[in-house]
Image (cartoon, grey):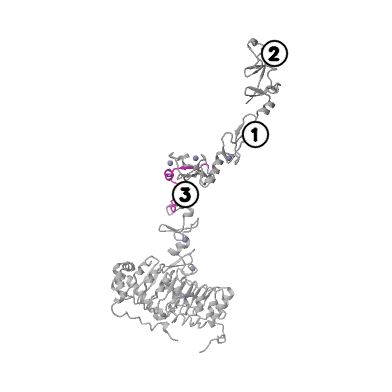
Amino acid sequence: MMYSKAEVVQAINMSLGAMHCTRCADGFEPNEKIVNSNGELWHTQCFVCAQCFRPFQDGIFYEFEGRKYCERDFHVLFAPCCNKCGEFVIGRVIKAMSASWHPQCFRCQLCAKELADSGFIRNQNRALCHECNAKVKAEITGRYVCQKCHGLIDEEPLRFRGEVYHGYHFNCTACGTELDSTAREVKSRPGLAANDMNELYCLRCHDKMGIPICGACRRPIEERVVTALGKHWHVEHFVCAKCEKPFLGHRHYEKRGLAYCETHYHQLFGNLCFVCNQVIAGDVFTALNKAWCVHHFACSVCDTKMTQKSKFYEYDEKPVCKKCYDRFPNELRRRLRDAHENTMKKNV
Amino acid sequence: MSQSTVSCLPPKMSKAKKVLDEARETGECELDLVEKGLVSFEELPGLFNMSNITRLTLSHNKISLINPGIANLLNLEILNLSNNQLRELPVSLSSMPKLRILNVCINRLDNLPRGFGAFPVLEVLDLSYNNLNEQVLPGNFFGMETLRALYLGDNDFEYLPKEVGQLKNLQILGLRDNDLLELPREVGDLARLRELHIQNNRLQVLPPEVAQLDLLSNKSVMKMEENPWVNPIAEQYLLGISHVIEYLKTDTYKIIYNRHMQGGRSGPPPPKADKSKKASRVRA
Ligand SMILES: [Zn+2]
Ligand SMILES: [Zn+2]
Ligand SMILES: [Zn+2]
Ligand SMILES: [Zn+2]
Ligand SMILES: [Zn+2]
Ligand SMILES: [Zn+2]
Ligand SMILES: [Zn+2]
Ligand SMILES: [Zn+2]
């Protein structure tokens, strides 16, 4: 099918004896108007629609199987109607799904993408693009669809920039090795949601890149890194060695290569007040292998507050003020004194 | 027998009553009534209505009985009756919901009430310098799971019940100056213990399980002098506590200990100390 425009020339300087009308085969008169269409010559009265025998308006005609038709007759006789919009399809016709379509009217029935140049797949009497067809198939089989080749992925998929792929479509950014699902996606701009700059590395190259590895789970840390105890940690994996709750930025205490929350550090290593059994926040009074908060450092017999300078006696490893000690039964004081002297002797 | 009533009080307002009035005025939560010559709670009118108080210190008085009404002090956390003349304790004490520290050292307690061990949150219990022994401990005594410190020094224990091992939170166990002949193996179950006072008893051996305890850290105290230890322990003790603990771990010692416990000990048990001069022995 074609649409053409013919040219009308004046037969002036042509050697008329050698020329014939393509339709009637007669020669041409001198100075007669001659139609030239792609090198074929016609009498103007012979250059007419093969159907209605009328001249072509503006010289525009449509050709089909060697015959020329006016626009109206051509459409009536030959031009297909678009299955979508019902208009004649002039120019490029898409023949598909047992019908004709304008290229811009033939679209994927799920995502409405034009299919004229990308091809289509017939799926349950629907024309679908490759992607949609793959998705539909994947939904049925429960497998992943590669975002690159649209084929189903049989093994573990490679995850990259939020999509899934066959690993073999990619190569390690560093060494070029073909990748598989163990490949590591490296965020080029940590912390940002945009992942279009991310790159893929094979495990070996990834490990060599010095990306911090979590001291607890041994996996790379791509978000916030906590550095403590000479190691790196995922925020949620840096936990109290006793209660295993993450510190999440709260203060931690280190002891013998382990980290503890405030409560457990004090519970395990001291500084709980002997009287209130609470963590001592301010000044700590220490004596007789115990600790006291400012409010509770007192004589254990009369509860009178003592200061750092107060002199006290020891009774069962508890402090006793002089006033109280003097009120102890005589025989108890005597025994305590003897015991004290004996220890002094032993320690000499 | 005379019963003291309010009308018996001296006409002049007592010092103790003044302390109470002041506390009521200022809203003070801690009451200091040390050495006020108090004989009875009757001298503290209205005390049991002061439910806001958190500490009551009555040391160095002459109180012989605690009025059961004391249990009305629902917010009381610390009760200190050191150096009084208490012969017994009311069972109502054990129901006090916030009582964390009870100090009744230097009194004349011959027994403890039935159900005494019911304290819900008691952490420190000082019963030292009384007349207690294993026979008078109520059945639930070692049910006080919240106990951090138990002072039983200067009493008359010959044996310590093996239930002591149930005191999972115990950090301090004071048994100084008793008549102890042995310690139960269950002492080794007190995983948090860091003070063990057993000086001045009649102990010849220690259960090997004592070596499981953390008695050597810089926060720990192990007092074991003045006991008739078997020779190998006495020798190690001269070198230091750490040597004793290491020795308790040896197989040699385990054999010695087992033989001793099977009655292999020679001669009669070591004599008790003379306690007739103890103030707790005074009979009113
Ligand atoms: Zn159309
Ligand atoms: Zn589509
Ligand atoms: Zn693919
Ligand atoms: Zn690589
Ligand atoms: Zn981790
Ligand atoms: Zn913790
Ligand atoms: Zn405190
Ligand atoms: Zn004092």
- Residue A248, numbered circle: none
For the stretch drawn in magenta, the main secondary structure is: loop
Q: Which residue is mark 2?
A: A32
Amino acid identity at mark 2: Glu
Q: Secondary structure at mark 2?
A: loop
Q: Earlier in the sequence, mark 1 or mark 2?
A: 2
Magenta span of residues: A196-224
Could you say where residue B284 lies in the image, as x and y percent from the top left?
45, 86
| Quarter of the view holding residue A319 | bottom left
Q: Nearer the viewer, mark 2 or mark 3?
A: 2
| Mark 1 vs ligand 1: CB below 8 Å | yes
Please, which residue is most extreme toward the bottom here? B1
Could you say where residue B16 lies in the image, as x and y percent from the top left?
54, 80
Q: Chain of mark 2?
A: A
Answer yes or no: is residue A299 visible. no
Disc 3 to disc 1, C-alpha distance: 57 Å
Q: Which residue is mark 3?
A: A221
Tags 2 and 3 on a common chain: yes
Q: Chain of mark 1?
A: A
The tally of labels here is 3
| Quarter of the view holding residue A285 | bottom left
| Mark 3 vs ligand 5: CB below 8 Å | yes
Q: Which residue is mark 1?
A: A82
Amino acid identity at mark 1: Cys
